[in-house]
Image (tube, helix red, strand yellow):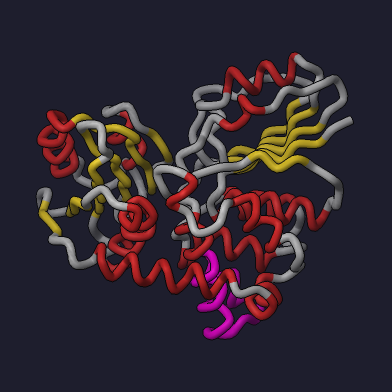
Amino acid sequence: MHRYDVCNGDADGLCAVLQWRLAHPAEATLVTGLKRDIELLQQVQAQPGDEVLVCDLSMQRNLAALQRVLQQGARVRYFDHHEVDGIPRHAALQAHIDFDPRVCTSLLVDRHLGGRFRAWALVGAYGDNLGRVADALAADMGLDAAERDQLRRLGEAINYNAYGGAPEDQHIAPQRLYALMQRHAQPLQMLRGEAIGAELDALRRADLQQALAQPLHCAGARARWLQLPDAPWSRRVIGSLANELASAEPDLAHAVLKHDGRGGHVVSLRAPQHSPRGADALCRRFGGGGRAGAAGIDHLPAHELPRFVAELAAAGWDGG
C-alpha cells in the first residue's frame, strides 16, 4: 500500500497537508508544484488499496484523474474550497468541499482535526489572504499581535514562493520547503529554527517594492488594474501584489496582469474583500477560474484585454 499527498504548492496547500501528516504520521509521496500547477492528480498512478490525500486543488480540474484513481482501487480523501459542478459519489471517496469565501483548505482540515494544529492552519489562511478570519482565530488562541504578524508574514512568504512561470523562478522548490516545514509541529518554532522564512519574506518585500512602482489604472468606480512586465520578479510577485492591493483598498476589485511571453497576459484577480464574490465568474468568461474572492487566467490573448477591462469595470462587485 502506497500513500500520496497531492496539493497546491502554495501556503494553503502545503499547510493543509502538513496538518494532516502531523495528526496522522505516515510515509507518503508528496506531489506538488507551482501555484498554477492544478491538474496534479494526473501524476498519481494508484494501485488497489493505496491512499490519496488531495488538498487545495480544484476537483473540477482534476475530475477525470480522480475518477481514474478511484477506478484503480485507491481510497481518496479530498479537501478543497474551489467550486465544482458535481462531486462524484463513490464509496472510496471522502470529499470535504466548502465554497464559502471565508474559508480555505487549511481551515477545512483544521475543522476536521478539531483545531489540533491550528497555528499551521492560520499560516495557510494568512497566505490565502484571509487575514481577518485568521486574526480572529489567532486572538481566540491567545496569540498576541507580534505572534500574529509572524504567522502572517510566514504565510505570505510561503504563498509568494509558489508563484513563477517555471521552477527556476522560485527561491526554493515546494517539496524542499515542505520538508523544512515538516520538522516543526508549530510554525513559530520553524521561524526560530529555519532561515527560509526570513529569506522568503525579504525577497517578497523586494519584489513588491518594484511592483508597487507600476501605475494603477481605473476600471470603473469599483476596480483597478495594473500591468507588470514579464520578468522573474514579476512572475514571482503577481499573487502577492494582488493580495496587497486588495488589502489596501478592500472596497475595490484588483486585477494584476503580466505579459506572458506568448502574445497575451497572465491575470491574477481579487474581488473586493468587503464583498468577495464574482472573481471566478469573470475569469471563467476568459478561460480561467478560481474562487469567488480570488481567481486567475493563465492566458488572456492581447486582443481580449479591452474586453476584460470593460467587464472588470461593469462587474459591479456587489456579490454578483
Query: Residue 210: x, y in percent?
Result: 25, 66
What residue span does the magenta drawing correspond to?
A: 134-155
Query: Residue 126: x, y in percent?
Result: 51, 64
Q: Residue at x 56, y 37 (%)?
A: 57
Of residue 63 and residue 93, the one placed in the foreground of this image is 63
Query: Residue 220: x, y in percent?
Result: 10, 49
Q: Is residue 224 magenta?
A: no
Whether residue 201 is situated above or below residue 30 in the rendered picture:
below
Whether residue 187 sits left or right of residue 21 in the image: it is: left
Whether residue 319 is situated above or below residue 177 in the rendered picture:
above
Q: Quadrant of the N terminus?
A: top right
Whether residue 149 is situated above or below residue 271 in the rendered picture:
below
Q: Which quarter of the picture shows residue 7?
A: top right
Which SS does the magenta portion mostly show?
helix
Q: Residue 273, can we see it?
A: no
Q: Is residue 147 magenta?
A: yes
Q: Quadrant of the C terminus?
A: top left
Of residue 232 and residue 12, the one placed in the foreground of this image is 232
Residue at far front of view: 168
Q: Residue at x 73, y 50 (%)?
A: 112
Of residue 172 and residue 181, the one placed in the foreground of this image is 172
Label count reads: 0
Q: Residue at x 65, y 23 (%)?
A: 66
Whether residue 316 sits left or right of residue 140 in the image: it is: left
Query: Residue 49: x, y in percent?
Result: 87, 25
Q: Residue 237, can we see it?
A: yes
